[in-house]
């Protein structure tokens, strides 16, 4: 299991998610806590890159971008749209 962190950029984005996004966001956050490498690499040329994205919501209208720090068993949430 990975520790998931937020910062001064991502936390306000989470705080202002619309109510209908709360459950889908909680689900995608659980995925990155357990299996962060399941996300798509942000860089197509580098499929093993630690910066990854996961879409969330019924129509994939949300997007989570995050950095995996495997040696620390940590995931930093970078952007939540």
Image (spheres, rainbow, N blue to C red):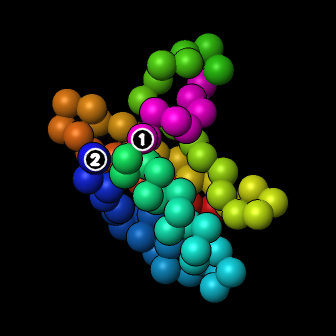
Q: Secondary structure at mark 1?
A: loop
Residue drawn at the location 55% of the way across and 18% of the way down: 47
Contact (Cβ within 8 Å) of mark 1 with mark 2? no
Q: Is residue 18 left or right of residue 67?
A: right
Quadrant in the picture for the C terminus: bottom right
Residue 20 seen anywhere in this rendered image of the structure: yes
Residue 78 seen anywhere in this rendered image of the structure: no
Residue drawn at the location 58% of the way across and 74% of the way down: 23
Residue drawn at the location 42% of the way across and 29% of the way down: 50
Numbered-mark total = 2
Q: Is residue 18 above or below residue 69?
A: below
Q: Position of residue 48 (x, y in %)?
A: 48, 19
Q: Residues within 10 Å of mark 2 (few under 14, many from 20)?
A: some
Which region of the structure is painted magenta? 35-43
Q: Is residue 59 above or below residue 42?
A: below
Residue 64 is labelled as: none
Residue under pointer 2: 2
Residue 35 is labelled as: 1
Residue drawn at the location 29% of the way across and 36% of the way down: 69
Distance from the alpha carbon under mark 1 to that under mark 2: 8 Å
**Displayed quadrant of residue 5:** bottom left
């Amino acid at each position: 299991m990975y520790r998931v962190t937020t910062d001064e950029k991502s936390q306000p984005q989470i705080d202002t998610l619309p109510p209908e996004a709360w459950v889908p966001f909680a689900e995608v956050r659980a995925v990155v806590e357990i299996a962060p490498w399941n996300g798509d690499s942000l860089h197509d040329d580098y499929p093993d890159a630690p910066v990854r994205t996961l879409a969330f919501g019924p129509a994939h209208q949300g997007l989570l971008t995050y950095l995996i720090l495997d040696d620390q068993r940590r995931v930093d949430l970078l952007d939540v749209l």
